[in-house]
Image (spheres, coloured by chain):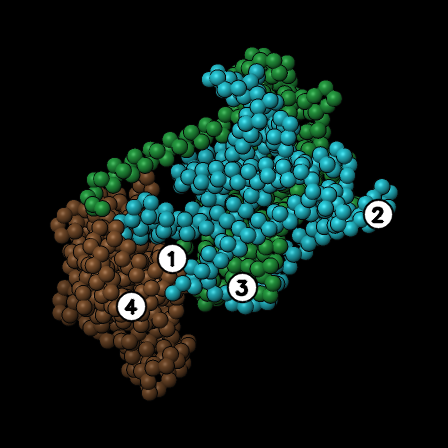
Chain colours: A brown, B cyan, C green
Amino acid sequence: MARIELKDLAHSYLPKPGGEDDFALKTIDLDWDDGGAYALLGASGCGKSTLLNIISGLLEPTRGQILFDGADMTHAPTTARNIAQVFQFPVVYDTMTVRDNLAFPLRNRGMQASYIKERVQQIAEMIGMDSQLSRKARGLTADEKQKISLGRGMVREDVNAILFDEPLTVIDPHMKWELRTQLKQLHREFGHTMIYVTHDQTEALTFADKVVVMHDGRVVQLGTPEELFEKPAHTFVGYFIGSPGMNLLDAKIDGSTATIGSHQVPLGAGYAALSGHTQIGIRPEFVTFTDDTNGLPVQVTQVEDVGRHRIVRVGFEGNTLCAVLPEGAPLPEGTQNITFMPDQIGVFENDWRVTPSTGGAS
Amino acid sequence: MDKPQNNRAWFMVLPVLLLVAFSAIIPLMTVVNYAFNDTFGNNAFFWVGVEWFKETLESDRMWGALQRQLIFSFTILAIEVPLGIAVALAMPKKGVWASVCLVLFALPLLIPWNVVGTIWQVFARIDIGLLGYSLGLIGIDFNLGQNASAAWVSVIMMDVWHWTSLVVLLAYAGLQSIPDAYYQAAKIDQASRWAVFRYVELPKLKGVLLIAVLLRFMDSFMIYTEPFVVTGGGPGSATTFLSIDLVKMALGQFDLGPAAAFSIMYFLVILLVSWAFYTIMVNLDREEERSE
Amino acid sequence: MSTSPAQPTDKAGLRRLASYAMLIVYLLFLILPIYWLVNMSFKPNVEILNQLTLIPQNPTLGNYANILTDPTWYMGYVHSLTYVILNTVISVTVALPAAYAFSRYSFIGDKHLFFWLLTNRMAPPAVFVLPFFQLYSSIGLFDTHLAVALAHCLFNVPLAVWILEGFMRGVPKEIDETAYIDGYSWFRFFTRIFMPLISSGIGVAAFFCFMFSWVDLLISRTLTSTEVKTIGVAMTRTSSATGLDYGTLAAAGVLTIIPGALVIWFVRNYIAKGFALGRV
């Protein structure tokens, strides 16, 4: 187990990068705590796989450093970093048995046969494959193979971190849940640093203690799932997390009032003068319908029933908003008024969250 | 891999079946016709039963040619397959040099076979050929017309020169289709280069290698133009392989009956050996999968 | 086995050096006869037959002139290219769905059909000369590009199917299933997702079809006469009662390599493309 620090990291796939746009990763400064369970979340192409490959040593960064427990490993080969990686599709040695697959990394390091036997048995039990140890790896199902991949990664005791690159992509939906649970359990039992790359927020939010959200080559937020939900640091986080995502409206901010189009909305706190592109964000969960005519007048356009609650889409002066209607509440129609819970409104300047200068929670 | 039963898959295979059968059935019927009949031309056929077959089986000449052919085929297989794999492994995976190599490897394959034969015929001569002359310089008597081993060496060298690239291209394409993740995982597992070859590359290359072996076996077993141009089957009949013998019989002596019978048996031998190769490979595969 | 980082690099470096050395030796081995061919093509026959010279002493463009000024010759290239490309396109197009069926499904007679395909390559082409002549004449396709293209299908289609099947087998079925779940129609899945994954197989199969069709002189000559003159016809003119016209033959050989070299240059990216599991 190790603490991994990324300092001033940037990477470009071009041999001679010019401006910022040439960089797949733009200046990352991040610390991964020893033993933490992290999710690296982001849309396709945001650079999360690049980052993972830099951590595992399969890519050397154009700029910056990566430290393992304080030691500079930026140019160290993969083998020296003692990491394990589970890939998007199962990577097993088909011609070997399950047992040989698990034993492979240990045998290559010249460990003693008795130790290997014991360790393989231990890991096999952990991943639930001990009854299949003598089977050839080839005929197994995709999830069994992924478990072997995982086991092979964990069989070495000196593993610094385990990296997962969207490992559940080829797994059947009903097995995904089981594997995720097993991963979480393994983390609790053994405490390895785990970094789990995914574009699926459910996977990220259920697996990780802390989530790193990436967008366009940058880390936009590092926080617990709650923090990401309640206080997104970037409009992308607001939009990406939650289903549906946060409502974002262009607004003019003036002290503790926001002006949206022709209406004014009270904010839960006061803000200093802002320039640039300002928006307010409010999650559909905190949008309520009201009879108060001071609220925002909107036109109901669509109602979706998703089981436990309903999603109402409304239009306001060219903007579309979503509101979550709890079960049992009456269905609104036609023209309605909505209000936003003031302390749940986030203010964003140029896509980044602005801390209020007076009052309210930030 | 468990494959779902789906007889509608026949539709996907139909075009191939029609195209190939169209060209295969009629010639087959013609050859069979000739093999069992005697003719004085003018489409007058006299049934002679298995007489042509008997004649062929009793022909010493045919057995001699068969023996030489088997030695030739297995020799070149033993050289070309390992060499081809080794070269494919040594090739750069991408970049300009990979492209340059690919083009250079392809060149020998693209030359019409009579030209290939001609090149080597001149190349191997002691008076005007680079190879023959150089060997002469170090004291080797490389007279193709008189020295049977010289003839054999030339023919084998020519085949290796001509066809190894086929194995290289197949093996290279096969290697390219191995996902990077396997190499990465092997690095993480600290596997030695040999272990990577044995556990990652070789298993994935098995399919491709089977094709390469079968192709080279079949084509070498039927080889005609190249050795004929270089040695004419000589000296004497030292390099008279099956095809050369067959053509001599059919064209030289115009014995279509025996030639047709010979062709059928020729075909059956190739069929048998190929089928054996194929079945062995498939069964090895299946055994591995089934082992508990 | 020690795990110190320094050692593996040395061994790896040495290994790489040995690999490159072998590669270079092999390339030289390949190039030498080709150089010899080019060499011969610039020499007059007199020089070829009487002297061993590494560089032409009396360099001449006469051999090439013979070819390039003779309409039979260069039309031969055009005609041959036509039926070869026709054949390559037909063979690969027809082989793709068939190979997919063989690799993904089992159906009645599949194993026998698969092996039967290969048996069509097990007879010497000479055997087919007379029957093909009769067959294609009787359906009125004698002396057309299509005839030669179809005739070559006998050998090339099985080859393409076998090669493609081998590569398709390596693609995990989960990819097919994921695509269907994501709503792709079979055709879109096949062209957008599947084919890129087996691109090296397609490149190699296409090149081999091109190659085997291009170098066949016997069948192409048999099925054509006046309308379609192949390079095979042109080649026979280089051997006469007075012996082989080595110079012209060599020049013809050199010219024959060029189209094929271009083909492989164009498919090189397909062959060299790795298996990139696209992010869907």
The residues tagged by marks 3 and 1 sit, at their Cα atoms, a distance apart of 21 Å
Which of the 4 image quarters holds residue A279?
bottom left
Which of the 4 image quarters holds residue A344?
bottom left
Question: Which residue bears the numbered disc 2?
Answer: B45
The answer to whether the residue labelled 3 contacts the one labelled 2, judged by CB atoms less than 8 Å apart, is no
The residues tagged by marks 2 and 1 sit, at their Cα atoms, a distance apart of 58 Å
Question: Which residue bears the numbered disc 4?
Answer: A130
Q: Which element carries disc 3, helix, strand or loop? A: loop
Callout 1: residue from which chain?
Answer: A
Question: Which residue bears the numbered disc 1?
Answer: A94
Task: Establish if A116 lies above or below C10.
Answer: below
Q: Residue at x 32, y 44 (%)?
A: B193
Residue type for callout 2? Phe
Give neighbour class at mark 3: few <14, some 14-19, many 20+ (Cα, 10 Å).
Answer: some
Residue type for callout 1? Asp
Q: Which element carries disc 4, helix, strand or loop? A: helix
Give neighbour class at mark 1: few <14, some 14-19, many 20+ (Cα, 10 Å).
Answer: many
The residues tagged by marks 3 and 2 sit, at their Cα atoms, a distance apart of 46 Å
Callout 2: residue from which chain?
Answer: B
Q: Which element carries disc 2, helix, strand or loop? A: strand
Question: Which residue bears the numbered disc 3?
Answer: C105
